[in-house]
Amino acid sequence: MNALTIADALATKYLAANLTAPTGYKAISNSTARMPNAIPTSPYVIVILTEGSVVLGAGELNHAMEFHVWFHYAKHTGDLARDMTAMLSWLGVLLAATWTDMDLGVSGIRKAYPTDYRLAVFTYAGVEYYGWDITLVVDFRETVSLAA
């Protein structure tokens, strides 16, 4: 299993080329599984693997990997009504990102799907952003040779 390959495939789902911004809003500037030192422009997506579990089967390992998709919408502007309208406009788009290709094009992935989301105020590199923290589970199976 290569967790970086899976994280990169998940991040690709949130690139502007693959995800249409809600009407009237700026497209995502970048989506990555490689955490930057700072966010150059927003909206910006960072994908991280926070935890997982492995179940041993007959000649296989079944992983449930919990990724977090951090959607950094914009720096705190002070215009709460405008920011929250934008956040609500983005939520459905972000949640649907994996529905049309749940295996992410990666061999061994059964499905990748959102399970939870929460409004977040992120502080990243000393800057405060409004955003969404979306939990996605990736079910992954790999064949292994086991020895006693």
Image (cartoon, rainbow, N blue to C red):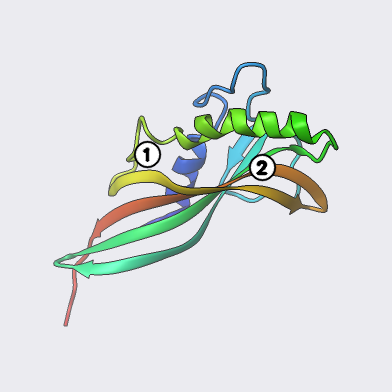
Regarding mark 2 in the picture, which secondary structure is present there?
A: strand
Instruction: Give the residue furthest to the bottom.
Output: 148
Residue 44: in sight, yes or no? yes
Q: Residue 43: x percent and y percent?
A: 68, 34
Image quadrant in which the N terminus is located = bottom left
Query: Of the residues under marks 2 and 1, which one precedes in the sequence?
Result: 1
Who's the residue at 32% across and 53% down the image? 139
Residue 42: in sight, yes or no? no
Image quadrant in which the C terminus is located = bottom left
The residue singled out by tag 1 in the image is 104
> For the residues carrying marks 2 and 1, which lies nearer the camera in this image?
2
Q: Is 20 above or below relative to 12?
A: above
Who's the residue at 52% across and 26% down the image? 19
The residue singled out by tag 2 in the image is 131
Regarding mark 1 in the picture, which secondary structure is present there?
A: loop
Q: Which three-letter amino acid code belongs to the residue tagged 1?
A: Leu
Q: Give the class, few, some or many, for how many residues have Cα within 10 Å of label 1's Cα (few <14, many ≥20).
A: many
Who's the residue at 48% across and 49% down the image? 116
Q: Is 142 above or below relative to 19?
A: below
Q: Residue 141: x percent and y percent?
A: 26, 55
Q: Residue 95: x percent and y percent?
A: 48, 37
Instruction: Give the residue furthest to the front.
Output: 81
